[in-house]
Image (tube, rainbow, N blue to C red):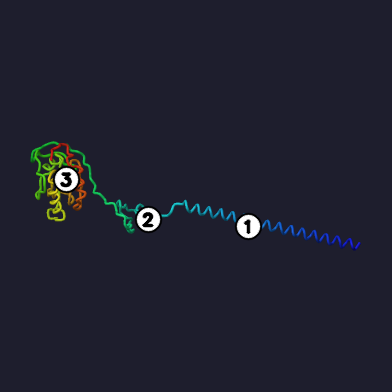
Amino acid sequence: MAKAAKKETRRQARLERRAHEEAKQRSGRQTRLLWIIGGVLAAAVLVGIVAWNSTRPQAASSPSAAQSGTEQAPGQPASGQPAQSGVAATPVRPQIVTVKDQGREHLLPGQSHPAYNSNPPASGWHYPTTAAWGFHTNEFPDELLIHNLEHGGVWIAYKDDNDSAVVDPLVALAREFPRKLVVTHRPANDGPIAVVAWDHVMKLERFDRTAIVDFYNRFKNKGPEFVPD
């Protein structure tokens, strides 16, 4: 009986050790599985963060002109920001205004007529004669110069005859373009220089050769009455 009891005790001990080993193995497998699942979840979260950062809009480094309440001229850098090195700003071209045509009616000197719709006028009532092409230091009636415009000419009116920064280059320009260009003194201007063709006016605050020559080439001989140069 004692021998059988010892044998049973040893069998029970073996069973307990086997059960303990099996429980330990199961615990190890569960731990490894948890680590694998955790690693997969962490990788998925990391991929999601990288994808979100790559697709979200980037914040501007400086406030835009609209946010600051000011409108930037074309080609100019935002306020407070230096211009990029090696990148030329686009020049702002002067505005050319198209004026409503007031007709081509002739009248005699001293004869009254309705008011013109621009300063200087670009169409309307005018004398039957024209001014000579070229530079003039004296002032002519608007009604005389409008006839030059009707013939396809370009009229440059300067306000201040003592402004050498305006007058001197206009003298040279009139020599360069001796036909279909007339330059006159006109104190009634509302700015230093006005360049006029039939139905078109461009006003300048300073002499701008590029703008004036472009205007001349664009509107020369475009009046309602063609007269050869």
Q: Which residue lies under the disc numbered 1?
A: 35
Q: Quadrant of residue 68?
A: bottom left
* Label 2 to label 1: alpha-carbon separation: 48 Å
Of the two numbered discs 2 and 3 on the same chain, state the one appearing first in sequence: 2
Position of residue 136 in the picture relative to residue 88 (left or right): left
| Residue 174 x %, y % | 13, 48
SS assignment at label 2: loop
Under mark 2, the amino acid is Pro
Q: Which residue is mark 3?
A: 120
Label 3: which secondary element = loop
Q: Secondary structure at mark 1?
A: helix
Q: Where is 20 relative to 215, above or below?
A: below
Q: How many marks?
A: 3
Q: Which residue is mark 2?
A: 63
Query: Residue visible at 47% across and 53% down?
Result: 54
Q: Look at label 1 and name its amino acid.
A: Trp
Q: Nearer the viewer, mark 3 or mark 1?
A: 1
Quarter of the figure with the N terminus: bottom right
Q: Position of residue 2 (x, y in %)?
A: 90, 63
Which residue corresponds to the image point at 23% horizontal and 44% vertical from the top-left? Answer: 97
